[in-house]
Amino acid sequence: MKVTQAEFIISAVSPKQYPDASLPELALAGRSNVGKSSFINKMINRKNLARTSSKPGKTQTLNYYLINKEMYFVDLPGYGYAKVSKTEKEKWGPMMEEYLQTRKPLKAVIQVVDIRHTPTKDDKGMFEYLKHYGIPIIVVATKTDKIPRGKWQKHAKEVRTTLGMEKNDPLVLFSAETGQGKDEAWSVIWQKIKE
Ligand code: GTP
Ligand code: MG
């Protein structure tokens, strides 16, 4: 897809602040620092529209980005970062659950994992949670630039088995550094929007 326009709309912490439910939404979930915001930026050809950081815990609200005035990416706070205070965690747990369980225009969650590592307990927990609520999932294994191409398939298989993905669950190998997997990711996103 050719992205000609992308803009930040709002950092929402409650449903009152969500935009009109008139356009499809794709939400980004994944461990802190895994590369969710970088994924958005690469997909829309913008360096830092979605704020990224080498420090985990950067994104702490539901950040809405409007793409070509036809869909939203919703950047969710990362999970699994021990240093985030307990009060912060108590705030976003319910905030994310409310969004994931009730948001009508949500077409799929893009769950981002690091291709270098076996998915963590938290990754597995998130995947199972989404399955449980019947939310379509696109798994993106990012940072392929960090391992040799010859190892990609072995790592991809590890991701599939550890998460317990079914044959038809899409897995996209991606890199925000090289743009690997970008076209495939757009194609899977459109499939989910149209389903
Ligand atoms: P939180 O908002 O804290 O949950 O993190 P996030 O998941 O949004 O991660 P973010 O996009 O901020 O990226 C974290 C770090 O990983 C940054 O230093 C990025 O430059 C780096 N990074 C993200 N994607 C890639 C990638 O595909 N390849 C490489 N080499 N680095 C990446
Ligand atoms: Mg982020």
Image (tube, helix red, strand yellow):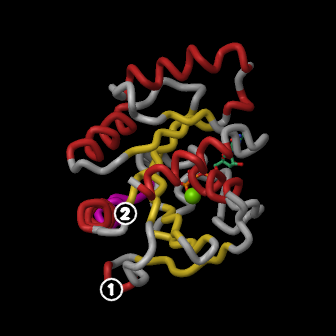
Q: Position of 161 compared to 174: left or right?
A: left
The type of residue carrying mark 2 is Leu
Q: Which of 174 and 54 is in front in this view?
A: 174
Furthest residue toward front = 194
x 57%, y 52%: residue: 36
Q: Main secondary structure of the magenta part?
A: helix
Residue 162 locus on image (x, y percent)? 38, 23
Around disc 1, counting alpha carbons within 10 Å, would you say few (fewer than 14), some (14 to 19), or many (20 or more)? few
Q: In this view, does 168 lie above or below 67?
A: above
Disc number placed over residue 189 in the picture, else none: none
Q: Quadrant of ligand 2?
A: bottom right
x 57%, y 74%: residue: 66
Please tell me whether residue 85 belongs to the stretch shown in magenta.
Answer: yes
Which quadrant would residue 160 be assigned to in this image?
A: top left
x 56%, y 36%: residue: 172
The residue tagged 2 is 106
Residue 195 locus on image (x, y percent)? 38, 53
| Quadrant showing the N terminus | bottom right
x 61%, y 33%: residue: 173
Magenta range is: 84-92
The residue tagged 1 is 16
The type of residue carrying mark 1 is Lys
Residue 167 locus on image (x, y percent)? 38, 25
Q: Distance between the residues labelled 2 and 1?
A: 16 Å
For label 1, being within 8 Å of ligand 2 is answered no
For label 2, being within 8 Å of ligand 2 is answered no
- Mark 2: secondary structure: strand
Q: Is residue 113 above or below residue 192?
A: above
